[in-house]
Image (cartoon, coloured by chain):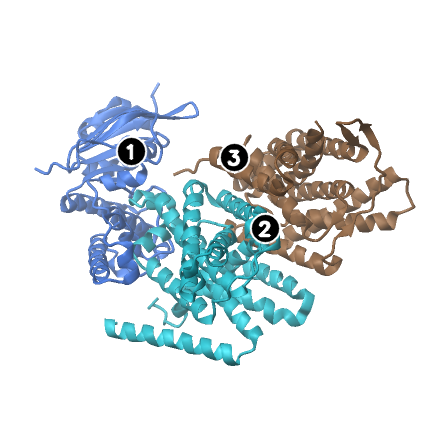
Amino acid sequence: MNSVGHFKVQDLSISFGGLKAVSKFNLELKPMSLTGLIGPNGAGKTTVFNLVTGVYPPDNGTLDLDGSNLNGKEPCQIAKAGIARTFQNIRLCGEMTVLENVMLSYHMKKPYSLLDTLLRTPKFYAQEKKVTEEAMALLKVMKLDSKAQSLSRSLSYGNQRRLEIARALGTSPRVLLLDEPAAGLNSQEKVELMHTIAEIRDKFKVTVLLIEHDMKLVMGICERITVLDHGEVIAEGLPKEIRENKKVIEAYLGVSE
Amino acid sequence: MTKWTFWVGTFVAVAALWGINYSLEEYANPYIVRVIINCGIALILGLSLNLVNGCAGQFSLGHAGFMGIGAYTSILLTTLSNIDFFQSPMGIGWAVVAGGGAAALAGYLVGLPSLRLRGDYLAIVTLGFGEIIRIFFLNMEFIGGARGMPGIPRESNFFWVYLWAAVTFIFMYRLIRSSTGRAILSIRENEIAAEAMGIDVARYKVVAFVISSFFAGIAGGLFAHYQGFIDPSTFNFNRSVEVVIMVVMGGMGSFTGAALGALLVTLLPELLRVFAEYRMVIFSASLVAVMLWRPMGIMGHKEIWHFFKKKGEA
Amino acid sequence: MQNIINGVAQGSVYALVALGYTMVYGVLQFINFAHSDIFMIGAFVGIYAAKWTNGYFPPIVQVMVVTLCAMAFCVALALTIERIAYRPLRTAPRLNVLITAIGISLLLENGGQVIFGADPRQFPSLLSTTSLLNSDELVLNNIQLTVILVSALLMVILHWVVHHTKLGTAMRAVSFDIEIASLMGIPTNQVIVFTFAIGASLAGCASVLYGLSYPKIEPLLGVMIGLKAFVAAVFGGIGNIMGAAIGGIILGLAESFAVYYISSSFRDAIAFGLLILILLFRPAGLLGTFRREKV
């Protein structure tokens, strides 16, 4: 049994000027699990991601990855600890090539020193080659290898989302957070993407948490689901349980009088 | 490229620099030599600022300050100290390097707190630091104060200036085409994404700033030992703006672009001398024109050789 | 006490120029580097206007006429610059607009040197200086008093315009979010034009007030004053009108005390020292609010 990628979030809270965006959020991700985080617009899903990855410092709560505490760490330290993410509003390095975008995420492993860089030592060439190959392999998984040399801003919307995933995988994460990876795709692309996500989980032995609007999709692939509304967890459990949960139905469809 | 060809190439390049230097000193018109050397110093300044403004996307407006620190530190050693070593040509070379080191240190001290600030705010703080440095020199009587510092040994020449320009270019080019380079570029492209990919953005901003300041300091040292005289007004806000213009005109993030910008900014006013008093007017108008009609600068993000490659290859 | 009077008088000029920076920044989020040179041009227009109007009016009226001429010319100039150089770049990256502004600033400075000559000119003394107060420790003359009163009046008017008129509401809306404002039917271009016009007219007025108190006018006059006024704007919180006024006065006071207690040669360093301190410890300025980037 793979034991890395065990991620626990306890009592996570933040408020923005009096508005409780997320309050007392609890979540436990078992190693290699695939969990969905759903909820209506403005429920605080992306805020949870931002809190977990250190973009916003939480008012309260603890983050624990495989027994080490991640509280108060900078986003880059959290990435180094093994939590990678994608962004809902795509954030690629537009003027860099697709390949360079993925190679960027290998930087934190410090493949070679500044001296190697300037003197162009054999180590530089060897490491650069190795990183290029690994990045290409990731692009292949995301079916982007043919576009490796294009500028990332020239990619189609769907491909940009896939590139974000490839780039996140480049950090060799234990936990992968996907923020609406299927947004803007057509229904066939969505189904394909969900299969790819499941494949990634098995191939890279990574714990996945994904935000998604489309209930059907989430129900299809996620093993567990957490439902967020007004910054609070209103339900947590197996897809089957969630489907029948009264509070969830109310949150999505409104209360019937 | 094998090691053998590399060393031969280096040797030939250095020998060529030496040869050109000799023939310039022997035969060329002093005015032409002056313009050529000013171009070389501008190259170092433009290339170094390009790392911060063009590649890392951090808008610095205080480059002249770091140039000034390099200049004054080096003359402190060669002109004001009584150490014999620094009177020799070799020693002057090291004094220039020390100037670069002092500028790098200043860059670290300035960069560490101020690089947290974004965009315009950073521009203003660096502007402020540049001015403070200048006013500091203005008030230090032992380095000449406002009257300036004469009697600096005139040891830098075509050879040294262009050797340093070449070193700067190779340094920057290799740096940016590496893992560290990708990290620096990602700051310009998308800071938040860079952080999420494990790039310590704050650190690499400072790294870029320190490297850039180092070369600005070198340029200052070379300048001082070419002119033989410096005064604080050499390193004023207008000088900083001039360097920014080089980078922006040439194309942000392109090193050949920055080099082109440096040549344009130095040569245009010289070429426009026929227009006498109108030359600076034409110069500033052309800057506005470039911004209006070619907002990415002359080269954009591309290097010069990208224009000669076939489509699809680049 | 004398330092306070000198400081407030000097600070009022900074404040008036700072208002131009802060208003344009508030609406368009860019530093209008050319603003300081508009101020300089205003001073020169003042010189010419004073020459032409000499003898036709009593002194007080003449000062008013000269001020109006300077203000009108500054507004015309600012609007031309906005139309030719800034408006085409409305959607361009901010750096480009900034560089363009620097380019325009250089253009005005160098153009000024060609047209007016590089040597300083004398601003005519339209009002003869009379001391209103003259004891051993305190000197206050009519010019200082005029500067302070006129500046205060202008700031009150400006405050009223921004907070109590339809135009002011539109300005605040544009500064909040230019796209949404335009969707709500606010003619954003007109609002921007008004913002530039108000800023330039304040600069024009400030230039005459400056000329009355410091009659040495040269084409590079704007550089230092502009930088300091800008510092004042940042110090008070850029985009904030009260902030610019307070920032200007504080800067004027700090300088006049620094000259008195430390040395006049460090006078210019004071402004930048203050600037760096405030940006490091309170980056949004005294009265500013910081906008968080949405992720």
**Rendered residue at 48%/49% (across/down):** B59
The answer to whether B47 is drawn above or below residue B9 in the figure is above
- Relative depth, front residue between C95 and A137: C95
Q: Position of residue B274 (x, y in %)?
A: 66, 72
Disc number placed over residue A52 in the picture, else none: 1
The residue carrying pointer 2 sits among few (fewer than 14), some (14 to 19) or many (20 or more) residues within 10 Å by Cα, namely some
**Rendered residue at 41%/75% (across/down):** B18
The subunit letter for the residue under badge 1 reads A
Disc number placed over residue B145 in the picture, else none: 2
The subunit letter for the residue under badge 2 reads B
Q: Colour of chain B?
A: cyan
Quadrant location of residue A235?
Answer: top left
Q: CA distance from mark 2 to mark 3?
A: 28 Å
Q: Which residue is mark 3?
A: C278
Q: Position of residue A68 (x, y in %)?
A: 20, 32
Q: Colour of chain A?
A: blue
State which mark lies toward you, 2 or 1: 2
Q: Is residue C266 visible?
A: yes
**Amino acid type, label 1:** Val
